[in-house]
Amino acid sequence: MKRKIISIITIVLALSVLSANAASVPRESAPVCATEEQIIVTENLVGHILDEVQGGLGYAEARAKSNAVIFNAWLGGQTSGFAYGDLVNIANNAIWQYRDMYLRPQFYIENEEKVRAIIADVITQCANGEIDYIKACETARTKIYQSVNPNFNPDVEYAKDSCYRDIPEVDSSLFAIARKLLINSK
C-alpha cells in the first residue's frame, strides 16, 4: 500500500513537472465557447504534444496522440468533468495553429501589422470595453473580408443558401491573428 501511494505521488509530480514545461494552448486558437478551465485541463494533458508540434511533429500524428491521451484521461475520470469532445476540439485547434506557425512563420510575422491596421478600431473598442470579445471577433472577421472585397455585406451573404454565398477568399490564419490581437487588447 505504501509503495502504491509513493508511486501515485511520483506520477502526479512527474505530470505536474511535464505540464509546467509544456507548451500552452494559444488562446486565439481555442473555440469561442471554451472556458479557461477547459483550456488549462487540455494544456495539462497535451502540452507535451504541443511541444512536439512546435518542433516539427506532423498534424495527423499529433492529433492522433492527443486524441488518445484525452480519451484515456476521460475514461480515467481525469478531465475535471469536462467532455472528451470539448477538450479534443481545443487540442486539435491548438495543434493546427502550432503546425501552421511551424510551416509558415513568416506569414504570421508579415501579416500581424496588416491585420492590426485593418481592425484597429475594433481593437480599440474591445480594449475600451465598448464591445465584447465575441462581437469583436465577428466585426474583425467582416473587416478582414471587406479588405479583400469592400462590397462584402455579411447580412446579405449569410442570409443566402450556403452554396450561393459570395464570401471573399481569405487565409483563415488572418482570423487567428485578429483573435490574438483582440485578446491582447484586453
Image (cartoon, rainbow, N blue to C red):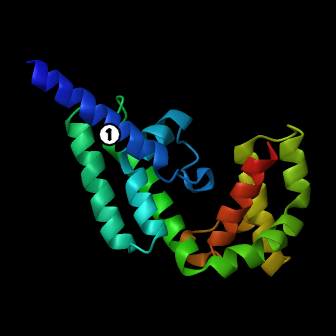
Residue at image position (36%, 45%) is 45
Percent position of residue 156, x then y:
74, 66
Compare residues 20 and 105 and report the one nearer the observer.
20
- Left or right: 119 in relation to 160: right
Amino acid identity at mark 1 = Ala
Tell which residue pokes out farthest to the top in this image: 1
Quarter holding residue 26: bottom right
Percent position of residue 84, x then y:
32, 43
Q: Is residue 117 above or below residue 75?
A: below
- Left or right: 36 in relation to 155: left
Percent position of residue 115, x then y:
80, 69
Secondary element type, mark 1? helix
The number of discs equals 1
Residue at image position (85%, 37%) is 129
- Mark 1: few/some/many CA within 10 Å (<14, 14-19, 20+): few
Image quarter where the C terminus lies is: top right
Q: Is residue 167 visible?
A: no
Q: Is residue 164 above or below residue 97?
A: below
Percent position of residue 109, x then y:
73, 74
Compare residues 7 and 19 and report the one nearer the observer.
7
- Left or right: 52 in relation to 64: right
Residue at image position (89%, 68%) is 117
Q: Is residue 50 visible?
A: yes
Residue at image position (84%, 65%) is 116
Image quarter where the N terminus lies is: top left
Quarter holding residue 160: bottom right
- Left or right: 41 in relation to 114: left
Compare residues 162 and 76 and report the one nearer the observer.
76
Residue beneath label 1, please? 14
